[in-house]
Amino acid sequence: MKPDFLEYIHDHVVLGDGALGSYLFEQGVERGRNLDLLNVQAPEIVLAAHEEYIRAGSQLIETNTFGANWFKLREAGERVQEINRLGAEIAVKAAGQHIYVAGSVGPSGIAFPLHEEEGVRDAIRDCFREQVLGLAEGGVDLLIIETFSSLEEILLAIAAARSAAPQLPVVAQMVFPAKGLTVLGEDALYCGQQMRAAGAVLVGTNCGRGVDATVQAVAKMSPLAAEGTPLSAFPNAGLPEILGGRMIYPAQPGYMAVRAKEMLRSGVHLIGGCCGTQPAHIQEFRSVLKIKPVRVQVLGGMEPRNEEPAVVPAPAKQGGFLDSLQPGRLPIIVELDPPAHLDVEPVLQGAAKLALAGADAISLGENPLAVLRAGNLSMAALIRQRTGIQTILHQTGRDVNALGLQSRMMDAHLLGIEAVLAVSGDSAAGTDQPGVTGVFDLRSYGLITMLDGLNRGFSMAGQSLRQQTNFSIGAAFSFRPADPEVQLRRLEKKAELGARFAMTQPLFSAEAVEQMLEHVRHLEILVFPGIFPLISARNAEFLHNEVPGISVPQELRSRLAQFSQVADQRKVALEYTASLVAQIAPMIDGLYIISPLNKWEIALEFVAQARQAGWQGSGRAKQHS
């Protein structure tokens, strides 16, 4: 059992969690979606996020209720209190008996300072009361009133919390963007004194303009710590940059952990992270600050039953596909698309010939570009049954909700499928079917997490499946030589979540492949570079200009353009690809051949080339399998 929070916090440093909102977006939750409503609509996603932070070492987690007040959830009507209660119950379920749960209360959304009549002030106070009542009903251990820019508003929130749930300790945190001052110029020490006088037992800061601003703010508040009031700090991971429509935060876990040491010297006893921080940051905090991890088993929300000793989770599996790879020869994957009709026999015949030629696996897309095709699960099962070759099922989060995805993966296991490539999926905007919209309950991160759980024998809700799936979990990697860092960080995250191999988008030069290999050398996963045999100059120009993430070298496009006949263009292009494959074969983990226009006959030539040459590749496949 955990000790009383107030008694414990005075003599110990408690490690909180990191950002919940930005982490949920990273896991595939659609941007713009109301995160507080996930407590009702998709509680398993919230539960999984809490569990990730607990695995990383968090001793305190915050509920997914930051914006769950009446002003921000007007459309939810009377459900506001219920949404807060559910948010608390989800966190309490994840926390078990060892982790503190803090009810998160954010600003109302009303602009301060107030100039309206007193009734507005009463309405704001009531909205905070309603939220706190729901959190208390859900079983939180304390409240964190956070990210307030206005001292006037946070004092209203503290008063409401003390009135609604006087038994719950209150942590109050304001935003001090620079030099320990609010946007209105109020000093951090003065604000801390006022929050303490209003009833907060810990005062501090979160969010703001990065780590340095947080260090400055808590340094100003340090006299309060000297007087016996512990401080709290949850800094952002630096100042964000927008890249490709995504918010990227630069502060690395190691840097933040070192700066956190400075905050402890100022009297911080509750430390965590805000925007841009993830479980990796919390894990580094735990290591650098030497905070002992809580001994608790977390497997999909399952708590230890009957007080039995916690069982250490099984290590992540390599899975059936990777285990099947033959030592001493270059692994080869060939991609075929299911047909856009029900005459599947030609694709089955092609798969049989590819298997006979020495391919190790057939990879099957799931309605690529949101264009209707025969189901890839049935195709994968038919190919596996007819040829015995491994099949890699592409699984998107676009077409099926989280419930259906889990059921589909259970089907795949029962049908003998042993490899899944987890991808978010193309937008449904380009579909050829009327009225189609994307679901996206899960995107690539969430899919990998789900598959890793199934491999351990648990559903997303923590229910035992009585057996474990045996999937080799794959991830897509869009390597862009001109700007590799964003996608590299995504691949690192996918590997951390459980991916064991990666398949890249097409690369068209040995230099690009070498550069890619240099960037991924530190990862303990196999990476299969995509090879797309071009068949015409038009084909090359289309891929280069219209398919995101694909770059066909100008030299190759110019060479193809010199020939007027498509047959001549194809001959030159295939010779170029054969030369490329020969150059990269000794250095790569495996080969991922994408059949152009589903022409498996072309891929067959390259499989035969590789087997006749007896290429062994990098040898890493043998080490991993």
Image: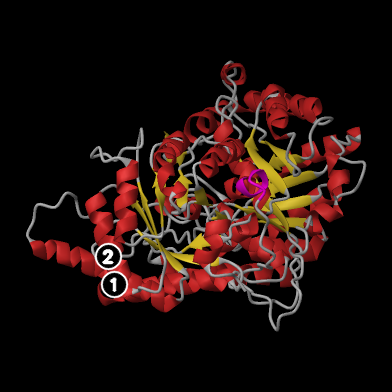
The reply, left or right, for residue 437 in relation to residue 512 is left
Coloring scheme used: secondary structure
Q: Nearer the viewer, residue 54 or 184?
A: 184
Q: Secondary structure at mark 1?
A: helix
* Label of residue 412 in the image: none
Q: Is residue 278 magenta?
A: no
Label 2 – label 1 distance at C-alpha: 6 Å
Q: Secondary structure at mark 2?
A: helix
Q: Residue at x 69, y 44 (%)?
A: 502
Q: Mark 1 packing: few (<14 Cα in 10 Å), some, or many (20+)?
A: few
Q: Position of residue 385 (x, y in %)?
A: 78, 66
Residue behind mark 1: 163
Q: Position of residue 39 (x, y in %)?
A: 43, 69
Identify the magenta region.
Answer: 285-290
Q: Residue at x 78, y 28 (%)?
A: 584
Residue behind mark 2: 159
The image shows residue 159, relative to residue 234, as above or below, that is below
Q: Nearer the viewer, residue 489 or 208?
A: 208
**Residue 340 visible to an observer of this rendering:** no
